[in-house]
Image (cartoon, rainbow, N blue to C red):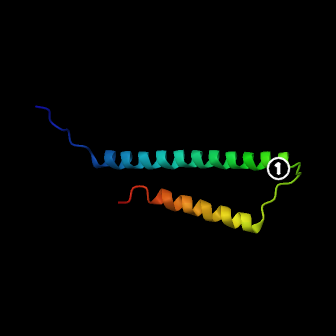
Amino acid sequence: MDQIAPVAEGQIEKSMETWKVKTLAIGGVIGALVGLVGAFMLVQNAEKKNVQEVSISSGEGFRLGVLIFGLLRQISTLHQE
């Protein structure tokens, strides 16, 4: 019969920290990539219109901020039941 070996408390804490670090790192990389894609799309749109400088109005910035906070709210409720 197989016996389960006891796990030291330090090992549990270490594995808990490992998944947290991995989650934060992956989230940071995904966030950076999404930001780069968004900036690229903004530049592409400006080039199509032959605009030399990209500008976002306060209304557009507000709408974008509301969308981002809505996305973050949805992410925060993923594992809630």
In this rendering, would 58 be left or right of 34? right
User: How many marks on residues?
Assistant: 1
Residue designated by label 1: 46
Of 33 and 17, the residue lying toward us: 33
Helix, strand or loop under label 1? helix
For label 1, the crowd category at 10 Å Cα-Cα, with few meaning under 14, some 14 to 19 and many 20 or more, is some
> Quick one: which residue is furthest to the top in this view?
1
Q: Is residue 12 left or right of residue 19?
A: left
Q: Position of residue 1 (x, y in %)?
A: 10, 31
Q: Position of residue 44 (x, y in %)?
A: 78, 45
Q: Report x, y in % for residue 41.
A: 73, 47
Q: Residue at x 84, y 46 (%)?
A: 47
Tell me the amino acid under the disc marked 1. Answer: Ala
Residue at 68% in and 67% down: 62
54 or 25: nearer the eye?
Answer: 54
**Up-down: is 40 above or below 3?**
below
Q: Residue at x 67, y 65 (%)?
A: 63
> Which residue extends farthest left?
1
Residue 66 drawn above or below residue 53: below
- Pick whichever, 77 or 6, lies toward us: 77
Residue at (48%, 47%) from the top-left corner?
23
Side (left or right) of 56 relative to 11? right
> Residue reaching furthest front?
49
Quadrant of the image containing the C terminus: bottom left
